[in-house]
Amino acid sequence: MPSFAIALIAAAIATVEAVAVLEKRAVTLPPANGKFDYQLGGAYTPPTGTQILTRDRTASPVTGLYNICYINAFQTQPDDATWWKTNYDTLLLRKSNNQYFEDPDWPGEIFLDTRTAEKRTALATIVNGWIDGCATAGFKAIEPDNLDSYTRSNSLLTKANNLALAKLLADHAHTKNLAIAQKNTAELTASDKATVGFDFAVVEECQAYDECDNFTDIYGTGMLEIEYTDNDNAQSVFKAACTARGATHSVILRDRDLVASGQSGYHYEQC
Ligand SMILES: *[C@@H]1O[C@H](CO)[C@@H](O)[C@H](O)[C@H]1NC(C)=O
C-alpha cells in the first residue's frame, strides 16, 4: 500500500478516536458524595444543599442540580400496563399458562419480554423515545429500573437478555450525552459494566442485604445508595452504611414509598 494511503487511513482512525473521546467526555457523572434525594413517589422542593436528584421521567428536573431521569425500562409501571397491552401486547412477558407475568414484589408491573433481538429492538425504540424526553427536559443521566427483572422471572428471562437491552439503551443515552446508571443487580461484574457501558450505579438496600462491596468494587465512589426505613433495624443499618461509606458516598435513608415531603410517612436522612 502506498504510504500516503496509510497516512490517510491513520488520519481517519485518529479522527474516529477523537470523536469517541469527545462523546465520552460529554457524559458527566454525579459528584461523588454529593447530597442526594430520591423523589420517585412525588416531586417536591429538595432539601437544602441537594446536588443530585432523581425524579420520574414525567417530572421536571431542577435547574442547577445533577438530575437523574428514572425510567422503568424492564417492566411496566402499574399505570402504564393498559397502554402496553393496547399498543405492544407482544412485548409483555407471559407465563406458560398465558397469564401476564407480573413482578411478584410489585403487583401491576408486568415484565417486558427481552428474550429475542427483535423484541429488544422494539422495546428500545419505545424506551429510547423516553430517553430523548429526558435529554430534552435537561436531565444529565438515566436510571433504567428493574434491570434485575430476570432474577424474579422463574428463569424465563436471562441476564444476557436484559444486558442486551441495557446495551441498546446505553448506546442511545450516550449519543444524547446522558450518563446511564446500573440499577441494583449485585451479581453483575466489571466486565458486564464494560459490555453495557454503565457509568455509575444506583443501589437500593445494599447495606441491608450486605452487598455494597459488589458495587463499590466496580464503581468506586460512583454509587448512590438508598436504604429504607421499613427494614428490620433500619436505623442501625443506616448508621452502619454511614460509618462504612458516608464520608465517600451519597447514602440516604428514605421511606419505601418515597412519598413527597409533607405527606404522611415521609422520611429523609443523609449521612
Ligand atoms: C457479591 O460478592 C460476593 C463476594 O465476591 C459474592 O460471593 C456474592 O455472590 C455477590 N453477590 C451477588 C448477588 O452476586
Image (tube, grey):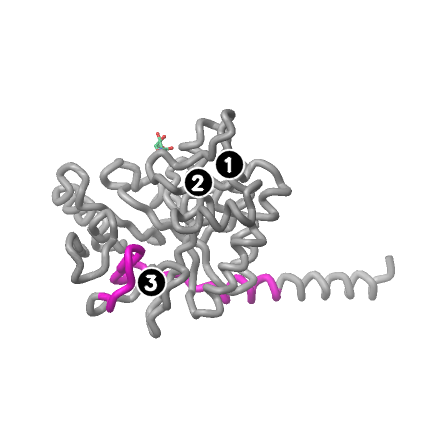
Q: Residue at x 56, y 57 (%)?
A: 172
Q: Are marks 1 and 2 in contact (CB under 8 Å)?
A: yes
Residue on which disc 2 sits: 110
Q: Classify mark 2: helix, strand or loop.
A: loop
Q: Rounded to the nearest whole Å, what is the CA distance between mark 3 and mark 2? A: 34 Å
Residue 18 found in image quarter: bottom right
The picture places residue 98, in percent across and down from the top left corner, at: 51, 29
The picture places residue 223, in percent across and down from the top left corner, at: 33, 51
Q: Quadrant of the N terminus?
A: bottom right
Residue on which disc 3 sits: 31
Which mark's residue is nearer the viewer, 1 or 3?
Answer: 1
Ligand 1 shows up in which quadrant of the image? top left
Magenta-highlighted residues: 18-46
Q: Is residue 114 visible?
A: yes
**Above-or-below relation of 51 to 253:** below
Nearest the viewer among 176 and 88 is: 88
Q: Classify mark 3: helix, strand or loop.
A: loop
> Is the residue marked by circle 3 packed among few (<14), some (14-19), or many (20+) residues within 10 Å?
some
Q: Amino acid at mark 1?
A: Leu
Q: Is residue 269 visible?
A: no
Q: Residue at x 49, y 41 (%)?
A: 112
**Above-or-below relation of 244 to 60:** above
Q: Amino acid at mark 2?
A: Ile
Q: Residue at x 52, y 63 (%)?
A: 132
Residue on which disc 1 sits: 93
Q: Rounded to the nearest whole Å, what is the CA distance between mark 1 and mark 2? A: 7 Å
Left-right relation of 120 to 218? right
Which mark's residue is nearer the viewer, 3 or 2?
Answer: 2
